[in-house]
Amino acid sequence: MELEKAFAMMQQNLGSALPPVMEKIYRQDPGLFASHLMGKQFAKPEGGALDERTRVLVHLAAAVALGAEGCARAMAHRGRAIGLDREALLEAVYIARFAAASKVLEDAEVVFDELE
């Protein structure tokens, strides 16, 4: 897909929720933008095992857990655009929170080892 068309599609799908960095990358480093698009095709292939709603929720949860605010905003916007309700979006956030909390507990294992 031509980069200009791909960027226009991103703008159409995400509107004002498009992370500003994506436009900067598109304009300043087309190769990096193209690489990002290839990554998306790998992560979200047409005809993949997950439907669009599930993909958006997984992407949202990952973005929240990683602290990728622009990405989380874009996926929340996309979720609303495809009809995800408040409860579904919040459940993705709760899952991200639980995963992050679980990581803290795993990282604390060294402390518990020392206490034995």
Image (spheres, rainbow, N blue to C red):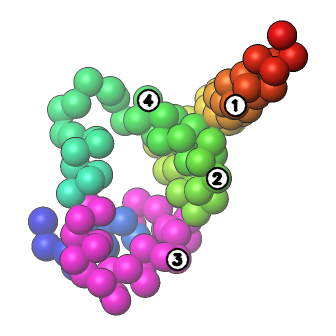
Crowding at dot 2, Cα within 10 Å, few <14 / some 14-19 / many 20+, comes out as few
Determine the secondary structure under disc 4.
helix
Q: Quadrant of residue 12?
A: bottom left
Where residue 104 sits: x, y (%)?
Answer: 73, 32
At a point 52% along the width and 77% down the height, the residue shown is 20
Choose the circle earlier in sequence order: 1 or 4: 4
The segment highlighted magenta reads 12-37
Determine the secondary structure under disc 2.
loop
Please name whichever residue, 27 or 112, is drawn nearer the observer in this view of the structure.
Answer: 112
**Residue denoted by label 3:** 20
Q: In the drawing, does residue 12 fall left or right of residue 72? A: left
Residue type, numbered disc 2: Gly
Point out the image quarter for the N terminus. Answer: bottom left
**Residue denoted by label 2:** 67
Task: Give the main secondary structure of the magenta stretch.
Answer: helix
Where residue 108 sits: x, y (%)?
Answer: 76, 28
Q: Which mark is residue 107?
A: 1
Q: In the drawing, does residue 95 fall left or right of residue 104? A: left
Quote the CA–CA distance across marks 1 and 4: 29 Å
Point out the image quarter for the C terminus. Answer: top right
